[in-house]
Amino acid sequence: MVWPSVREKDQYKNTTNLEGFLKQLSAKLQEKVDKTKRENDELETKLLLLNSLEGCLPGLVGLTVEHITILNSIVVECLKKLHGNGLLATLTMLLDLAPAFGI
């Protein structure tokens, strides 16, 4: 059996370190991409909500089921916050009616 030279050992060590470094860098960059996608989705959703509140989307025409579902979840969350702050006493009634509208 032939033992690797010091140079070969160093080269292997550097390659292994470089590999680890690149994997770590790749993971960090993927995290940034994922975070940016989440932020972008959140901003798009807020814009969609604002447009619907301003009447730019009458009857929510042209929205996908996914968009409407997202809007519904935002509205429900806002209603829950208002109820939690004591600003909305009829939240339970509204939530009870939601299934009647297919929400």
Image (tube, rainbow, N blue to C red):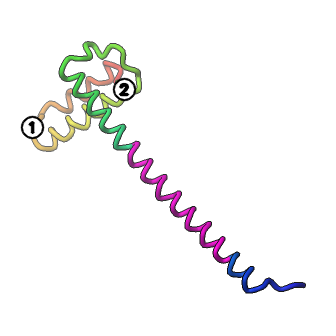
Q: At numbered mark 2, what does the secondary structure look like: helix, strand or loop?
A: helix
Q: Residue furthest left?
A: 87
Q: Which mark is residue 52?
A: none
In the shown orientation, is residue 94 left or right of residue 21? Answer: left
Depicted 94 relative to depicted 38: above or below: above
Q: Nearer the viewer, residue 85 or 25?
A: 25
Secondary structure that dominates the magenta span: helix
Q: Which of the 4 quarters of the picture holds residue 52?
A: top left
Q: Which of the 4 quarters of the picture holds residue 85?
A: top left
Residue 19 rendering spot, x and y as whole percentages: 62, 66
Depicted 4 relative to depicted 81: above or below: below
Q: Residues within 10 Å of mark 1 (few under 14, many from 20)?
A: few
Residue type, mark 2 in image: His
At 27% across and 13% down in the image, what residue appears? Answer: 59
**Does the magenta portion include 65?**
no
Residue 32 rendering spot, x and y as whole percentages: 42, 52
Q: Residues within 10 Å of mark 2 (few under 14, many from 20)?
A: some
Q: Quadrant of the C terminus?
A: top left
In the shown orientation, is residue 35 left or right of residue 101? Answer: right
Mark 1 or mark 2: which is in front? 2
Q: Which mark is residue 87?
A: 1
**Disc 2 designates what residue?**
67
At 18% across and 21% down in the image, what residue appears? Answer: 54
Depicted 38 relative to depicted 18: above or below: above
Extent of the magenta region: 13-37
**Does the magenta portion include 32?**
yes
Residue 71 rendering spot, x and y as whole percentages: 30, 28
Q: Which of the 4 quarters of the picture holds residue 96?
A: top left
In the shown orientation, is residue 34 left or right of residue 80? Answer: right
